[in-house]
Each structure stands twice: as C-alpha cells, then as structure tokens.
Image: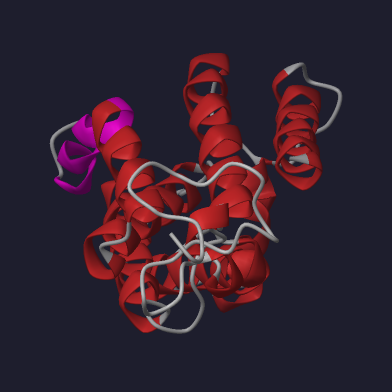
Amino acid sequence: MRFPLILSLLVALVSAIDLLGFANWQQYALRPRDWGQLYGIFTAPFLHGSWEHLLSNLPPLFFLAAGLKLFYDKIFWPVLLSGWFATGLWTFLMARSSLHLGASGLVYALAFFLFFSGVFRRDVRSLSLALVVAMFYGSMVWGVFPAQPGISWESHLFGALAGLLMAFYYRKKVDPPSKTYSWEREEDRPDETGIWDYRRHFEPPSGFQHPGE
C-alpha cells in the first residue's frame, strides 16, 4: 500500500500548497482544447478548487488505488497510468471550455475498473471487491450526469468509460492472486482408489481407509 499512500499524500501536499496561497498553480489545471496547456492532462488531478473538493477525493483515491494494488498488482501501473491519461485526454478533447481540475476523474476510472473487473472475471476475489466498491461508491454513478453546476461531470464520465474499457481489456490478461489450500494441491489428493496415503498424512480425513483395510 506504499505507493497508493504516497500518491494520496502528494495530491494532498500539492493541493494544500495551492489552497493555502503559498503558490498559484491553478494555471496547471486542464483547459479543453488549449494546446498550450496540454500538460493539464497530467497535472490537473493534483489540484483542487477547495478543501471540500480535496477531502472528498482523497479517501476514495487512496482506498481504490490500494484495492487495485492488492488485487491486481501485475497490472497496477498499466491501469493507473492508462486511466489517468485516457481520462485527461478525453476531457481535453471533448469537455466544455472551462477549468477542469481534481482527482475525481481518476477516482472514477479506478472505481469502474474494480467493479467491472469483478463482473467480467466472475471469480470470488474479484466479485468480493466489486461488491465492496458498489456498496461504498455506488452513488458515484450519478456523477457522470450534468446535475451540479461547477462539477466536471465530463471527467467523471470519461474516467468511468476508461475504467470500463480497461476492465474489459484486462479481463483475461492476468488473474488476481488467490490462495491455494492444501486440499487443492494435486499431491495432497487421494489416489483413484479413494485410499488416503498415510505416509504423507498422519491423520486421514473422515471417510477414507488405510491401505490394506
């Protein structure tokens, strides 16, 4: 969980410096179709318009990034960076001509990836995480609609779309880690006769007989 924590602290630090007035970094926000500020695709998630905005994004950013790292460690970086870039790029190309900033687009990308990965994979671990995401962040789905003025619903929409597409793309690329129990290992199973090998197991399970009985 080290990098999710570092990422969250970095977002908090950069936003706090800006909000406290020690620096004026609002010019690094994303301005759609302003090619001179194309860097906003990468810098906008570090900036927030208010303390409330920052505090509403930090907890889900940390927990969703931690869930991605714990359950999908092998594709953590491709998913994180692709979600970051795709959300920012689509917002830059197609959003309203306004100032867009905040980590909420990335949050939507992570949330929708984790949820739909469980839907597409249908294994116990992925489905369990998907249910947790749905329980805590299911109401986020309303953020993809233009309901509140001053909210970048476009970044929410494009982040959700990026997460959905990545979940579909990676559905068979790598499986989340799973624990193998002793009775699932081939060498610990009884032979075809149903006789338990007492040389490997001091106590045979119920229902099996010793050799020669």
Q: Specify whether 77 is left or right of 141.
A: right
Q: Is residue 163 above or below residue 1?
A: below
Residue 179 shows in the view: no
Give the image quarter of residue 148.
top left
Residue 165 in view (yes/no): yes
Q: Which quadrant of the figure contains the N terminus?
A: top right
Q: Main secondary structure of the magenta part?
A: helix
Q: Quadrant of residue 199?
A: bottom right
Q: Is residue 51 above or below residue 208?
A: above
Kindly identify the residue that appears in the image at 68 percent across and 55 percent down.
Answer: 43
**Residue 72 location (% of width, % of height):** 56, 61
Residue 12, by quadrant, is: top right
Residue placed at 54% from the left, 68% from the top?
79
**Applied colour scheme:** secondary structure
Residues shaded magenta: 136-145
Q: Nearer the viewer, residue 142 or 175?
A: 175
Furthest residue to the right?
22
Percent from the top left, x then y, of residue 189?
49, 67
